[in-house]
Amino acid sequence: MSTVTGLRKKDPTPAGPPPVVHAAAMLWLSAVALGAFEAALMVSRELFAGTSTLAGLLPGAGFRLAVFAGAIFLALRLRRGQNWARWTLTGTLGVFGTLSLVVEPTRWLLEGGSIAEAAAGLDAMGWVFAASRILHVAAVLGAMALMFQPRANTYFGSA
């Protein structure tokens, strides 16, 4: 028996995360992709309409890029069973990130706006953006729910 084979038998590779944690991490990564897509749509719309310059959009784009990089880092740590990543995702993107996505539409609805009125005024890019935003919020809420399922709690409790 070779040394490598002997080592493998003595030190088995740990199993990956339970399916709920893997799914939660994939949903976080999907939320990042959707957020990046929404940012690209917003920048394109602003530049095409001529309402902003590239230099004027760079600070916001840079901030979003930093948030996306942080979210990817945290999602990968989540898969490894690092409980601090679960709580950081919950507090930052799960709570404050979600609020930042829904506060403006909620305020608009509370001020008397209607979904039918909003839908009637959308162009093709508006529909794409709305669909992306809905999927983005659903991915975040789904990831949040999965991160605290019993099997996830067991996984993070043992890490």
Image: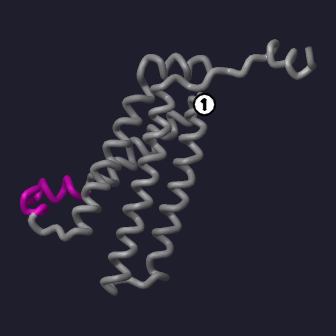
Q: Is residue 94 above or below residue 38?
A: above
- Tally the numbered discs: 1
Task: State the residue at coordinates (51%, 34%).
Answer: 86
Q: Is residue 84 above or below residue 153?
A: below
Q: Quadrant of residue 49?
A: bottom left
Q: Nearer the viewer, residue 101 or 19?
A: 19
Q: Point out residue 128 in the picture as x, y percentages from the top left corner.
A: 27, 62
Instruction: Identify residue for label 1.
Output: 82
Was residue 113 drawn as part of the magenta stretch in this picture? yes
Task: State the residue at coordinates (46%, 43%).
Answer: 28
22 sits left or right of 129 in the view? right
Task: State the residue at coordinates (55%, 48%).
Answer: 72
Q: Amino acid at mark 1?
A: Gln
Which residue ends up furthest to the front in the rendered image? 1
Q: Point out residue 157 in the picture as x, y percentages from the top left corner.
A: 56, 18
Q: Nearer the viewer, residue 23 or 71?
A: 23
154 sits left or right of 130 in the view? right
**Quarter of the image that includes the C terminus:** top right
Was residue 79 drawn as part of the magenta stretch in this picture? no
Start-end of magenta stretch: 104-119
**Quarter of the image that includes the N terminus:** top right
